[in-house]
Amino acid sequence: MFPHAAYQLALLSAAFLLSAGSVTAADVRPQGSGIRTGLEVASAGGFKELKGKKVGVVTNPTGVDRRLVSLIDLLAGAKGVELKAIFGPEHGARGAAAAGAKVADATDTATGTPVYSLFGRNRSPADEVLKRLDVIIFDIQDIGVRTYTYLATLIKVMEAAAKNKVEVWVLDRPVPIGGETVEGPLLSKSFESFVGPHPLPLRHGLTAGEFARLVNKERKIGARLKVIKMEGYTRRGWYGDSGLIWVAPSPNIPSVDTALVYAGMVLVEGVETLSEGRGTTRPFRLVGAPWLDGRRLAKTLNSLSLPGVLFRAAWFKPSFSKFSGEECAGVELHVTDSRAYRSVTVAVHLLSAIGKQHPGKLKFRERAFDRLAGTDSLRKELEAGQRPVVIISGWKKELAAFLKRRAPYLLYR
């Protein structure tokens, strides 16, 4: 049960409505390097609760301890534990597949364990595989952004496990972009998809374990859920405070700063006439197009004095994705203060500034943009030339309501 004091603290966080349209929980001191992930907590006891059980794991390259030993290898070497199946999400269990690419079934070369894809023909574990398991373990470093598909995979895993009476363990990990700030429009039910699996803000601030608790109740999944909590983690904690080594959770999130910028710039994926920097060494930090005046845009955006960021005129040539092989002009985002930076706020200001600077040049992929935003109202407001401050302030009420909704499921102060 959620401790009463922590629950009250979470409720009080709804009162902290920032003028930028984000909501922030009460300030606490950041943790030091004493944090232990759920994997490290579970492995410290030699996975004794799993002895005699048949186990499957849902993981990728981020499912490692601080020595960078994977959950797969730790379980394969644990006495009395039978590792029967490995399930790979988008990008695969070993993380080699590109964004959106279908992943095939395989065999893990290190352990000989069958690997089943959850991002190919099937998005859920097959009944015939689950019937051979007692426990399925989810251990993936999520980044706290609704559009990131790992939490959609977690829902599918929980639903399939509940159907087959298999226990679900979530080995919890930090929210690398901070767990106290929430931002952006709330997903409307009519826009649910694999990049929007549940009504959350774009930047939701939940750990995978907290998310699992919330959806298990709100979606009435009925999974036998066990969250292995972290030790030493706080909501305000930043990945740099944790003492953990960053392992890229997907090919285009090579750093924590990229994860933070992605939380807003993912919207650029839904703009046909803008590159979000895919095909470069700085995805999501570079935004541009062959027709864009980057110098003018950087000057405009810097004049807004948005917290925690500076913009530099930049030129780049993507090697794949939009404008492949073409020279693009635009801006590079430089995060100067991670805690002050507001990902979605910056993205709205950037898209608005480009629309005003180059009238008629922004062409939205309407269905894609709306799925990413979780609503069609953001696109329509941008197309109508609505001021960013008005767009952003329109989220305050629903963000405050979301903070109250999520409060009973939080595990960390």
Image: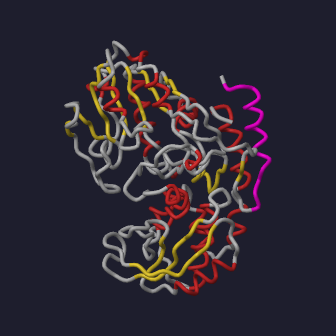
Task: Depth check: give the residue in front, 324 or 356.
Answer: 324
The N terminus appears in which quarter of the rendering?
Answer: top right
Q: Is residue 402 left or right of residue 367?
A: right
Q: Quadrant of residue 168?
A: top left
Q: Is residue 11 left or right of residue 258?
A: right
Q: Which residue sits at x=47%, y=66%?
A: 284
Q: How is the image coloured?
A: secondary structure
Q: Position of residue 7 (x, y in %)?
A: 73, 32
User: Is residue 154 positioned above or below 351 on the image?
Assistant: above
Task: Depth check: give the residue in front, 114 or 272.
Answer: 114
Q: Is residue 325 magenta?
A: no
Q: Position of residue 126 (x, y in %)?
A: 29, 31
Q: Which residue sits at x=48%, y=21%?
A: 224
Task: Depth check: give the residue in front, 375 or 400.
Answer: 400
Q: Which residue sits at x=33%, y=49%?
A: 91
Q: Is residue 125 left or right of residue 235?
A: left
Of all residues shown, which one is farthest toward the top?
52
How many numbered marks does the figure carry? 0
Q: Position of residue 408 (x, y in %)?
A: 67, 31
The C terminus appears in which quarter of the rendering?
Answer: top right
User: Is residue 128 positioned above or below 48 on the image?
Assistant: below
Q: Main secondary structure of the magenta part?
A: helix
Q: Is residue 7 magenta?
A: yes
Q: Which residue sits at x=36%, y=42%?
A: 60
Q: Position of residue 118 (x, y in %)?
A: 32, 41
Q: Which residues are magenta?
A: 2-19
